[in-house]
Amino acid sequence: MSIRWLLAALHLFGLGVGLGAVWARSRALRGTLNTAGIRRVLGADTWWGIAALVWISTGLLRAFAGFEKGTTYYVHGNIAAGLVGTTTAGTDNKQRTLTVTY
């Protein structure tokens, strides 16, 4: 039972980190995009990546390792299918590139 609660807490912790990363990236992009500004943007992107790693790893553990409701609940539920579809659509975007000249 305690591992179940720990995974749930880590999952929610990832939500807070991700929200903070989105906020930090927004603030960084509003400023000037000199070398320091780009470092702030990339730092926020790093925290977003950490949050994504936490979300994905704890989500997979909760769904398929038997800590929560079980695999059948997540595989056959409409909400889970919607979440997978949203995640797939979100990662299917074209990558944007940033060119920095010195």
Image (spheres, rainbow, N blue to C red):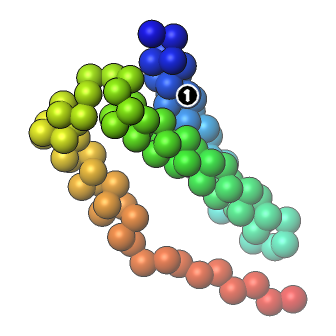
Q: Residue at x 52, y 49 (%)?
A: 52
Name the residue beneath numbered marker 1.
Answer: 10
Give the image location of residue 16, x and y in percent.
57, 33
Quadrant where the N terminus is found in the figure: top left
Q: Looking at the picture, how far across and down is residue 2, in whole percent?
A: 51, 11
Q: Nearer the viewer, residue 91 or 4?
A: 4
Q: Residue 3, relative to residue 25: is it above or below?
A: above
Q: Could one spot residue 31 in this view of the protein?
A: no
The 10 Å Cα crowd at callout 1, few under 14, some 14 to 19, many 20 or more, is some
Q: Quadrant of the C terminus?
A: bottom right
Residue lying at the far front of the rendered structure: 65
Confirm whether residue 61 shows in the render.
yes
Name the residue: 74% across, 56% down: 43
Left or right of 71 in this view: 31: right
Q: Vertical placement of 36 versus 18: above or below? A: below
Q: Is residue 29 left or right of residue 1?
A: right
Q: Residue furthest bottom?
A: 101
Q: Quadrant of residue 90?
A: bottom left
Q: Quadrant of residue 75?
A: top left
Q: Amino acid at mark 1?
A: Leu
Vertical arrangement, residue 4 with respect to residue 77, above or below: above
Tell me: 78 left or right of 46. left
- The number of numbered badges drawn on the structure is 1
Residue under the image location 34 percent in, 37 percent down: 64
Secondary structure category for the residue under label 1: helix
Identity of the residue drawn at 84% across and 72% down: 35
Residue 36 picture location, percent across and down: 85, 65
User: Whole-percent x and y of residue 69?
Assistant: 26, 23
The residue at the far top in this view is 1
